[in-house]
Image: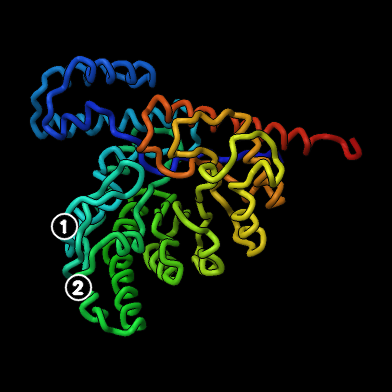
Amino acid sequence: MSVKFLTREIGSLGKPPWRVKSFAGRALDEADVADAARWGERLEVDGYERLAELLRRGSFQPADLEEIDDWAARYGLALLERAGLDVVYDGEQRRTEMYDHVARHARGFEERGIVRSFDNKYYSKAAVVEGPAVDDAYDVEEFRFVVDHTDRRVKVPLTGAYTMVDWSYDEHYARDGALGASAERRYEARTRFVADVAEHVIRPNVAGLVEAGADWIQIDEPAAATKPDEVPLVVQGFNASVAGIRATKSMHICFSDYSALWPHVLELEDCFELQLEFANRDSRDLGTSDEDRPGYADTLRLFKEHGYPNVGLGVLDIHSDFIEPAELVRDRILYAVDVLEDPERVQVNPDCGLRTRSWDVVYEKLSNMVEGTRLAEEVLNRAHAAPAGR
C-alpha cells in the first residue's frame, strides 16, 4: 500500500481588509477593491467581479454585509483549496475570534474588556456570571455554506471547554472556591465550570453540526497545558463535549509544554489524533537526525513511549513570515515517520491557525507544505518499492 498523508488546515486565516473595514464601518478605498479583485482572480473564485462592484458602493446594509461575509468565506475556502489541501474549512471568516465567538453565542458570559492573547492579537475577555448554556447549535449555517462550496473533506474547528474556562473571569463558580478556600474546593469549582461549558455550550454545537453532516470535529485547546495540574480537566472537557458523537474527533493544542499532557491524554475517548505545534521550536536546517530536528524529537518520543495513536504534525511556523522550503517540510515528515516507525500515524498541518500572517505568505507556506508532503510520500514509496537487499 502506498503512503499518502492528509494535508489539513488548523483553523483561522486573517480576514481580508475589505471584510474588516466593511464590518467596522470604515471607508474602503480603491486599493481594497483591487485586493478583492486580485485574490478573486488568483483563486479563480467564480463571479468575484460582483464583490468588487459591491465594495465600490462604500455604504452597506445588513444584507450587503451578509453577502460580504459569504465572499470572505468563499475566498478563505478557495485559498486553502488552491494551495492543495486535502481537508479544508473557510478560515473561520465569520467568527470574531475563537474565544469571543463562543462567548457571544452562550448565555452566562458578560464582556469585561480586551486582553492580549498572543503575537499582536487580542480578544474580548468575558466573565461567567451564571451557568453557561446555548439553546441550539450556532455553527450549522456556517458549516452548510462551506460544504456547499467545496468538494474536499471538511474539518470543523471548535474552541474547547477548558480554554473557554481558562480564558474567562469566574464570577459564578468561584463563589464556592473563593480566596481562602482550600485548593480542593477551588479545583471542584473549576471542574464544575468545565463540565457545564462542555455539556451545555460545546456539545450542543457539536451534536448539531454532526446532525447536519459534519464528519470531523476538531476541538481547539490552546490553554491545555498552561496549568499542568489541570490537564485532567482538559480531558474531561473533551470527553463530555463529544460523548456519544459519531464522527472523527481530534484535538489541537499549541503554546504548551507537551510533556505535561502525558499520561492524561491517554484517557481521551475516541480521539483520532493530537494536532500539535513543532515547527516554531525547530531549526531551519535540512536533515532527518535528532540534531537537525530539535523541535520534534522530545514530543514525538512521548507519542512513541506512551503509544498515543496519531499525530497531526505541525510543519509550518505560524509566528514567522519565513516560507518553509518544500524540502524542509519533507525532512520534518520523514523524521516523524522514522521516530514513530509507522507513516499511518502521521498527518500534516501548520502548527496552528495562520491568522497572524498575510494571505500572500499563507498561500506560499501552504503550497510548500503540500509540495513537501508529496516529496516525503515519494521518498517513502520509493523505499517501500525497492527490492530487498538494494
Write down the quadrant of residue 291 in the picture.
top right
Residue 91, given in percent of the width and then of the height, sits at 35, 38
- Is 95 left, or right, of 379 in this rendering? left
Camera-side residue of 87 and 287: 287
Residue 120, given in percent of the width and then of the height, sits at 31, 41
Nearer the viewer's eye, disc 2 or disc 1? 1
Looking at the image, the residue that sits furthest to the right is 389
| Mark 1 Cα shell of 10 Å, populated few (<14), some (14-19), many (≥20) | few
In the rendered view of the protein, which quadrant contains the N terminus?
top right
- Is 86 left, or right, of 289 in this rendering? left
Write down the quadrant of residue 352 in the picture.
top left
- Image colouring: rainbow
> Residue at left 36%, top 29%?
358
Residue with the mark numbered 2: 172
Mark identifier at residue 112: 1
Residue 181, given in percent of the width and then of the height, sits at 28, 84
> What amino acid type should be assigned to the residue bearing mark 2?
His
- The reply to whether residue 147 is visible in this rendering is no
